[in-house]
Amino acid sequence: MSGIGLPLTAAMHEDIEPRLRALRAPLAERAPSELTFANLFLFRAVRGWRYHRDPLPHLSGRTYDGSIQLLPLFDLASADPAMLGSMQGERGWFCPVATATLETLYRMRLETRAERADADYLYAADAFRDYTGAGLGPKRTAVERLHERHTMQVLPLDAATAAAAQVVLQGWCMDKGLAEDGADAPACREALALLASGDVTGPASALSGRLHLADGVPAGFVICEALNPGVQVVRFAKGLQRYDGIFPTMYRHIVLEGGDTVRWLNFEQDLGRPNFRRSKMSFRPTQLLSKHRVRVLL
């Protein structure tokens, strides 16, 4: 495998993000949700991301199930298979590889895997506008009930509202029986800090967030990222358990606020966690986007 590389830092944004954009743009709504610098940066600690410029630019880290992951920042189809074999070593896997990208590798002999836990959940945005689709009636009822019981207000997530969102995050952890550093709370806390900083050039440049208030009290927040034109990834969504209907309300607002500019929502992968899977499936995804792990056979 290649050398140990450099730990991922915010200063690498200008070098890495254009490479990621070039890879995800042709994939439109089917681009893997991981392929943004902000996402990689926020989870750099848990994933152990390191940046390698040689022999071809890539990141190395760990998948959620502990496999060695190589995230290519180049077109796999145009690379020399022998070089890819040298880069992967005995245990590394190139991933995530979209299905459309995998189809371009037909000239190579490959070992591939597609784990169900890795698949992204893709939804047509229109389904969230009024929740009239098949199986979505309970979501519509929950939204209506929340608005009947409370006066709802939405504010941008910024320096003025980040502290209130931190209170929601703490309450969400308590509702879930998690420590304050449990699940994705540390990455979420850093995302809130980035939004509060107002930095429009670094890792937070594509992030946007909204704080939802019920009778003036913080009830939930959501942080999204533009993946491709028309595609928003829901990076973090946290709500307090006592406000039933807060999650479908927040997702609906993303779509209504975005109008014609939001055609798809991506809820990322479920990591094999049953509660994540039940929640994401309950919104009736249009498609599960397989993400492949690839090794070259020499």
Image (cartoon, helix red, strand yellow):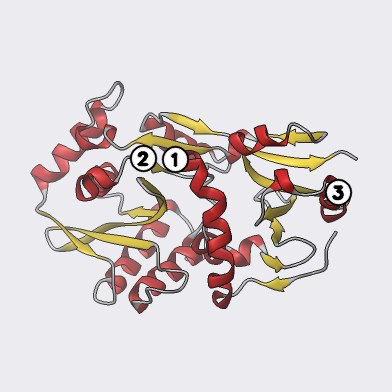
Residue drawn at (50%, 32%) of the image: 288
* Image x and y of residue 213, in percent: 18, 59
Q: Is residue 31 placed above or below 74 in the rendered structure?
A: above
In what quadrant of the picture does the C terminus appear?
Answer: top right
Q: Is residue 204 placed above or below 151 in the rendered structure?
A: below
Q: Is residue 194 left or right of residue 61?
A: left
Q: CA distance from mark 3 to mark 1?
A: 30 Å
Q: Could you tell which of marks 1 and 2 lies nearer the N-terminus?
A: 1
* Image x and y of residue 201, in percent: 42, 74
Instruction: Work out whether residue 230 can be spotted.
Output: yes
CB contact under 8 Å: marks 1 and 2:
yes
Circle number at residue 108: none
- Residue located beneath label 3 in the image: 85
The one of 169 and 26 positioned closer to us in this rendering? 26
- Residue located beneath label 1 in the image: 29
Q: Could you tell which of marks 3 and 2 lies nearer the N-terminus?
A: 3
Q: Amino acid at mark 3?
A: Gly
Residue drawn at (18%, 63%) of the image: 217
- Residue located beneath label 2 in the image: 264
